[in-house]
């Protein structure tokens, strides 16, 4: 379990699934204004999180966001923070704890149109490593490589 100030990351309890589903739906509606709002529902959360380990970030006893991890594939599948908690460290704390759990080689994908999400992941030290089908792949770099940011993304033969 990780803590940051008054924020705390821990595994989701079943009773918190509804709060996570509400955050999930609200975020998807904001991200896709081109899709009718009624196309998103809380049932989508159940489908999207099936088989994932869910961590929540808690602020003053309330769910402020969540992350969905696939340990087997070392992938962060989902990361959502409520609008009220954005900009207060909740996402950074979730991402850091997810990266710690998933370890070296952890990766995630982000919609290529999500410029704020991409900027957030880069600011947290994750590196864009490719694009496929409108999704950007990010990888958590080896901490040693993080000490030498000029080496990130440079082929070894170029050194």
Image (cartoon, rainbow, N blue to C red):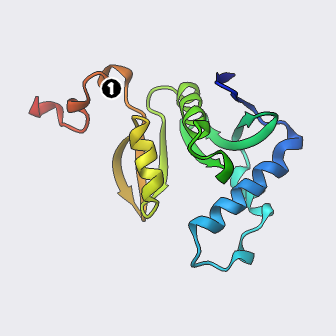
Q: Position of residue 34 (x, y in %)?
A: 57, 79
Task: Give the side of residue 96 with respect to residue 43, left or right.
Answer: left
| Vertical comparison of 39 with 150: above or below | below
For disc 1, the neighbor class at 10 Å (few under 14, some 14 to 19, many from 20) is some
Quadrant occupied by the C terminus: top left
| Residue drawn at x 77%, y 54% as measured from the top left | 21
Task: Specify whether residue 117 is in view.
Answer: yes
Task: Give the side of residue 13 with respect to residue 130, left or right.
Answer: right
Please count the marks in the image: 1
| Vertical comparison of 63 with 27: above or below | above
| Residue drawn at x 89%, y 42% as measured from the top left | 15
Seen as rendered, the residue at the extreme left is 158
| Vertical comparison of 3 with 67: above or below | above
Q: Quadrant of residue 135?
A: bottom left
Seen as rendered, the residue at the extreme right is 15
The residue to which callout 1 is attached is 146
């Amino acid at each position: 379990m990780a803590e940051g100030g008054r924020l705390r990351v821990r595994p989701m309890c079943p009773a918190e699934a509804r709060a996570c589903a509400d955050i999930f739906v609200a975020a998807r509606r904001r991200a896709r204004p081109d899709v009718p709002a009624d196309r998103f529902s809380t049932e989508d959360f159940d489908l999207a999180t099936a088989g994932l380990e869910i961590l929540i970030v808690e602020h003053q006893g309330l769910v402020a966001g969540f992350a969905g991890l696939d340990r087997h594939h070392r992938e962060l599948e989902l990361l959502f923070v409520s609008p009220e908690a954005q900009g207060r460290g909740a996402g950074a704390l979730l991402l850091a704890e997810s990266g710690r759990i998933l370890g070296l080689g952890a990766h995630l994908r982000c919609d290529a149109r999500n410029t704020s999400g991409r900027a957030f992941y880069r600011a947290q030290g994750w590196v864009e490593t490719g694009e496929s089908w409108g999704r950007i792949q990010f990888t958590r770099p080896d901490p040693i490589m993080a000490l030498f940011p000029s080496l990130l993304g440079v082929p070894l033969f170029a050194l």
